[in-house]
Image (tube, grey):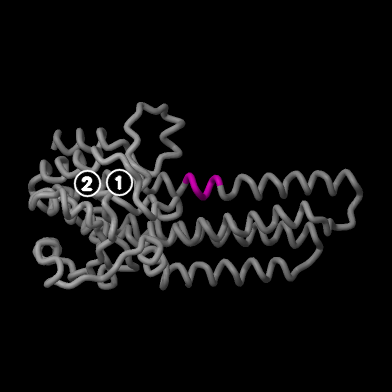
Amino acid sequence: MATLYTHQTENVAKTWVLITFFLTVVISLGWFFSYYYQSSEILYFAVIFSIFANIFSYWFSDKITLSVAGAKPVTREEYFDLYNAVENLSITAGLPMPKIYVIPDNAPNAFATGRNKTHATVAVTTGLLQIMNKTELEGVIAHELSHIGNRDILLSTMVVVLVGTVTLLSNMFMRSMWLGGRRNDDRGSGNILAIIGIALAILTPIIATLIQLAISRKREFLADSSGALLTRYPEGLASALKKIGAYNAPMLKANTATAHLYISNPFGPNEKKVSAIAKLFLTHPPLQERIKALENN
């Protein structure tokens, strides 16, 4: 039987796979370009940089995310209903009370972040608090607590830094190839290596981004399901998603790097019918699909 904790082990394993993937990608890029330029220093730089990026993303990616969102910590006295909803549902879920942040933004949205359940944060916008009734707010909070309970907050938050790292290094290597400094090879061999290097620099961040988006889409369905199990009232979250979908304007600080963390696309929900290929580039599954799944529970 599925529970709030069904996907804990799976998401911990995915986190280690993700870390290994990014380490491998960055080191592979470093090895190729150190070979191309005949400079072992490039490989040493790539290894050190990839290790540093993983450590940094583990400890600080949540703080970066909250800062990018413009989120501010709040107290029970300031937001009594929100604080009570988070506290009561945390007790029900058997989770430590997360920190609570509020984002001054009229767009209704929310996200959870942190490296583990004892260092977790739930952030909601002022717009969400203004339009949600009690059961709808509880549905959203349960969804976010499910991300914490399923241990996918670290996975999703680390992606923000790691995808950015791979993209940054790919851009650096791409620029270096255009600016010269080629290795002393015969022209044919050098041209082939240059083509391989350009292909790697272009395709690597694309693949990393697709992994980021795929993780996001799946985790939203899982959190919807787990949140419904937590409240025993899937209609509350379904109603909340309908209200979120009715607000078409983007968030004031919408950011592509952190878009996948939110309960709904911060650039505004796009409910147009899209092809299977186009869905690969969406940060979230269509709201109508999520609502339908909740209503069919």
Q: Quadrant of the C terminus?
A: top left
Predominant secondary structure, magenta span: helix
274 drawn magenta: no
- Please indicate whether residue 106 sits to the left or right of residue 172 in the image: left
Q: Which residues are magenta?
A: 206-210
**Residue found 89% across the figure and 57% down from its top:** 184
Specify which label sits upstream in the sequence, 2 or 1: 2
Residue 219 in the image, given as x and y percentages of width and height: 31, 48
Q: Would you say the residues marked 2 and 1 are in contact, meaning their CB atoms lie under 8 Å apart?
A: no
Residue 174 point in image, percent of width and height: 70, 52
Residue drawn at x 66%, y 48% as measured from the top left: 200
Q: Amino acid at mark 1?
A: Ser
Label 1 sits on a secondary structure element that is loop
In the displayed structure image, the side of residue 26 where residue 20 appears, left or right: left
Q: Is residue 134 left or right of residue 29?
A: left
Depicted 296 relative to depicted 58: above or below: above
Q: Circle 1 is placed at which residue position?
A: 264
Give the class, few, some or many, for how many residues have Cα within 10 Å of label 2's Cα (few <14, many ≥20): many
Name the residue beneath numbered marker 2.
224
Residue 63 percent coordinates (x, y): 38, 69
State the image coordinates of residue 198 (x, y, percent, origin top left): 71, 47
Residue under the image location 34 percent in, 56 percent down:
11
State which quadrant residue 50 falls in: bottom right
Disc 2 secondary structure class: helix
At 70% from the left and 61% from the top, the residue drawn is: 31
